[in-house]
Image (spheres, rainbow, N blue to C red):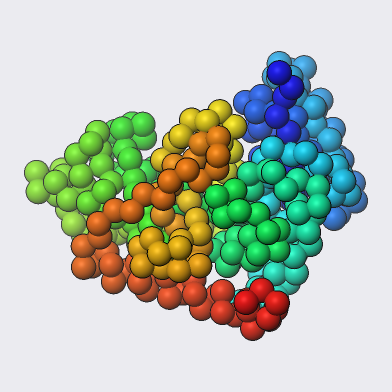
Amino acid sequence: MARSKIALIGAGQIGGTLAHLAALKELGDVVLFDIAEGTPQGKALDLAESGPVEGFNASLKGANSYADIAGADVIIVTAGVPRKPGMSRDDLLGINLKVMDAVGDGIKQYAPDAFVICITNPLDAMVWALQKASGLSPTKIVGMAGVLDSARFRYFLSEEFKVSVEDVTAFVLGGHGDDMVPSLRYSTVAGIPLTDLVKIGWTTQERLDAIVDRTRKGGGEIVNLLKTGSAFYAPAASAIAMAESYLKDKRRVLPCAAQLNGEYGVDNLYVGVPVVIGANGVEKIVEVALDETEKAMFAKSVASVKGLVEACKAINPALA
Ligand code: A3D
């Protein structure tokens, strides 16, 4: 059987890490695409040269032409620019919206059957725009944020309880940003909801509230430490988990930004919800019952996603 082909659009910090992980896990052959000449070629060659040491079999190629992504099974998009000092959110939105247009065209032309995972920020709006620009079925294009947000939540919880990260599950809903909704009722240690762990005195509500707050601001915490960029190891690992679920038809239940059409009372917006990812892409959107507080938090999060999408439509009315 031929190897799968994984195209990475954007060969920056996350793109390079994605290529490394994909090769180490032998998920398939990798094409690293970027508009910067030399960067994807250099990273691909450097990674390929680690192959004999690591013992992986995967070809890695750098590219500046969309023709090289032809026939990709999975595409992970990190192309774009980060916010620079003096740049407003709308400035960033306008620039990355144009990038999504170009990427969407490339995908439409060369890899219309791929499963696409978008990571570029502002995530929920960019994945919405990329779906429009590529014309892909919403079942074949999702945004990565929830896996990362819940991984951060799980890590902080494992430190709080001093237990293995493997025994902590976390549930995060909503858009990627300070309004995300980490749920205490649906997050567990070995199946025991966090709310019950407060009742048995293993932790306190105040400590959990502080962990939720740290999770919401998890991206900013890393930016403040790094000073020159944003997180890339955990974001790359998170997108690889999604790609692997698709390529191996694992049918994992993962929080992803998925297009909602009535689910959770939301229409034609990408918002983070639990989905089943299998060989057909998004195979199911899992709709759970929310209590009043969760509903209010979710509504606030959806409202900020909607605001970003409206800003995209104002910049490019063709997307409306
Ligand atoms: P960075 O290292 O700057 O890489 C971005 C790459 O995109 C650069 O190599 C650019 O040359 C390239 N690029 C720019 N324009 C284009 C274009 N038109 N076509 C192809 N390539 C282009 O950034 P990064 O890898 O650290 O982050 C990538 C994106 O992910 C950013 O938008 C981040 O904000 C975002 N991000 C999202 C999360 C989420 O959880 C959603 C987490 C971390 C980062």
Which residue is drawn at the image coordinates 9% and 48% (left, top)? Answer: 199
Write down the quadrant of residue 315 in the picture.
Answer: bottom right
Residue 195's x, y, as percent? 17, 50
- The quadrant the C terminus occupies is bottom right
Residue 187's x, y, as percent? 28, 46
Please tell me whether residue 204 is drawn above or below residue 92 in the rendered image: above
Please tell me whether residue 178 is drawn above or below residue 66 in the rendered image: below
Farthest-out residue, bottom: 314
Which residue is drawn at the image coordinates 72% and 48% (left, top)? Answer: 112
- The quadrant the N terminus occupies is top right
Farthest-out residue, left: 200
Report whether 285 appears left or right of 209: right
Which residue is drawn at the image coordinates 63% and 60% (left, top)? Answer: 131
Q: Is residue 68 visible?
A: yes
Residue 17's x, y, as percent? 67, 40
Residue 308's x, y, as percent? 55, 75
Nearest the viewer among 91 and 263 is: 263
Which residue is drawn at the image coordinates 43% and 46% (left, top)? Answer: 284
Nearest the viewer among 27 and 104 is: 104
Please tell me whether residue 82 is drawn above or below residue 4 in the rendered image: below
